[in-house]
Amino acid sequence: NLRSKRKKIIINSVNFATCFIDPQHEGRIRYPCDPDRLLHGLDLARKGSNVFISSEAFAKMDEEGVAMLENYLSHWSDVTIILFYRRYYEWLPSLFNHENKRWYRDESKW
């Protein structure tokens, strides 16, 4: 089976996804783009490897970011994009938890 022989790589990184959002966006400033992740992905494409990329930061892309992502993904012969929408009242507790963890990390530096 050809699918089982292909190596699968998972990139789960906000620092990958922020490469496709406006450089002045708060999300990209907080989580800067890691160009090495982009280069690693292109290396995997040349080797014929599959890549699974997941990040909420993709939601912050504008039209230019979508075009950049489309160009990046053109290095693979077969691309599947899966969108997941989290309802606001399911997302809100997650955001609260995330921000509290961040606040705790910042405060613990003192």
Image (cartoon, rainbow, N blue to C red):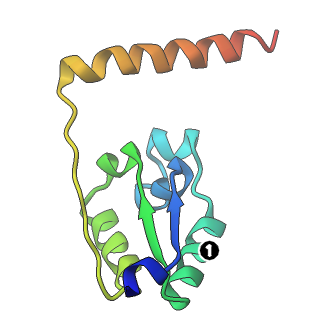
- Amino acid, disc 1: His
Q: Position of residue 55 (x, y in %)?
A: 41, 48
As drawn, 56 above or below 42: above
Above or below, 37 against 101 in this view is below
| Residue depicted at 54% across the width and 74% down the height | 41
**Residue 39 placement (x, y as % from top left):** 60, 76
From the image, which quarter does the N terminus lie in?
bottom left
Q: How many marks?
A: 1
Q: Which residue is mark 1?
A: 40
Q: Residue at image x 29%, y 17%?
A: 92
The image position of residue 69, as x and y in percent, is 36, 70
Q: Is residue 39 left or right of residue 73?
A: right
In the image, farthest residue toward the right:
110
**Residue plotted at (55% across, 80% down):** 44
In the image, residue 49 sits, relative to residue 64, either above or below, namely below
Q: Neighbour class for label 1 at 10 Å: few (<14), some, many (≥20)?
A: few
The one of 18 and 14 positioned closer to us in this rendering: 14
Q: Secondary structure at mark 1?
A: helix
Q: Is residue 40 above or below residue 11?
A: below
Residue 52 falls in image quadrant: bottom left
Q: Which of 56/50 is in front?
A: 50
| Quadrant position of residue 89 | top left
Position of the C terminus, as image quadrant, is top right
Q: Is 82 in front, or is 3?
A: 3
**Percent coordinates x, y for residue 57 in the rendering:** 40, 46
Q: Residue at x 71, y 9 (%)?
A: 107
